[in-house]
Image (spheres, rainbow, N blue to C red):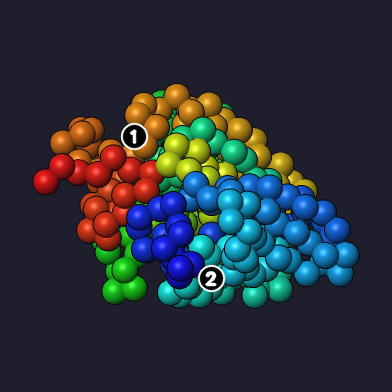
Amino acid sequence: MKTADRAACADPILNEDWHVVADLASVPPGARFATKLLGVPLILDRAPDGTLAIHRRDDGATVVSRERYGFAWACLGEPRRDILDIPEALETDRHLVTGGSVGVAVSGLRTVENFLDMGHFPFVHTGWLGEEPHTEVEPYIVEITEADEVLATECRFFQPVASPNASGGIMVDYIYKVVRPYTVLLYKTNPLETDRKDVIVLFVQPVDEENCVAHPFLCYLRTGMEAATVRWFMQLIFGQDKPILENQYPKRLPLDPRAETPIRADASSVYYRRWLRDRNVTYGAIPARA
Ligand SMILES: [Fe+2]
């Protein structure tokens, strides 16, 4: 039996891709760690020399694995493409920080969609990423790029504390990019080096269809910033999102265009759902009826 045939998930685009399955900081050399990917129970073993091996708990088969950006990666089938390339991770004046993996009892697609949504800032991240009366999401541009990504540009939002090193509220420029069904990037104005951007990548591990682990990877400019502060800020913000996400119903993301009424501010969400539909992503979704 080929590896891909054993996968619990019917979507080749997911079975044949790499997914983060652990922050290596939480699996030190000599340790063993159990997790799940796309419904498949996995065991991660790190030898005393740090070498990583991953196998399935159901049939013992070896799973292809890699280490990159401080994470353990697994692919249940034959990898169709490489792990995402992040050029900013090679820039030496940035902190590269894993932001603390957080389990969330909701579909990972919901977690990606929530990450794209600026409308919730004043209400969920009150006093940090937004505050009343600055609640309006100004029109922005969304497109599908030649590289087959969902790209949202010219996103602007007023934020009281956009970043740990921000002093006072500023209008923040955002660029969002969904590069894989469960991976989204955010480029955000740095308050001190305004011509450069901090980068937050959210690698979402689909544990099963209604549970995920969000693994943030932060590439923040070092100027005026400590790595620990970067991690603390991400954990603060994501801790505010988690209960909101876990209250979403249904837990899977509806892809039927009639399922939820979009408003203009949700343009990126509308594109994201359409993009998932067009790529036959069903795992973690409620597929559109024909
Ligand atoms: Fe949020």
**Closer to the camera in the image, 14 or 273:** 14
Q: Earlier in the sequence, mark 1 or mark 2?
A: 2
Please give the name of the residue rendered at 65% of the width and 74% of the height, measured from the top-left corner: 91
Residue 192 rendering spot, x and y as whole percentages: 63, 57
The amino acid at mark 2 is Ile
Residue holding disc 2: 83
Circle 1 Cα neighbour tier, 10 Å, few/some/many (<14 / 14–19 / ≥20): some
Q: Which mark is residue 217?
A: none
Front-most of residues 259 and 72? 72
Q: Is 254 positioned to the left or the right of 237 in the image? A: left
Task: State the CA–CA distance, disc 1 to disc 2.
Answer: 36 Å
Q: Position of residue 228 (x, y in %)?
A: 77, 48
* Residue drawn at x 82%, y 54% as measured from the top left: 31
Q: Is residue 85 visible?
A: yes
Residue 138 falls in image quadrant: top left
Q: Is residue 141 visible?
A: no
Residue drawn at the location 62% of the way across and 66% of the way down: 62
Choose mark 1 or mark 2, whichever is in front. Answer: 2
- Say which quadrant the N terminus sits in: bottom left
Left or right: residue 107 compared with residue 233? left
Q: Which residue appears at 27% of the width and 57% of the height?
A: 280
Q: Is residue 146 left or right of residue 211?
A: left
As helix, strand or loop, the secondary structure at mark 2 comes to loop
Extreme residue in the left direction: 290
Label 2, residues with CA under 10 Å away: few <14, some 14-19, many ≥20: some
Helix, strand or loop status at disc 1: loop
Label drawn at residue 136: 1
Position above or below: 229 against 249: below
User: Quarter-wise, where is residue 15 in the image?
Assistant: bottom left
Is residue 83 found left or right of 274 in the rendered image?
A: right
Label 1 CB, ligand 1: below 8 Å? no
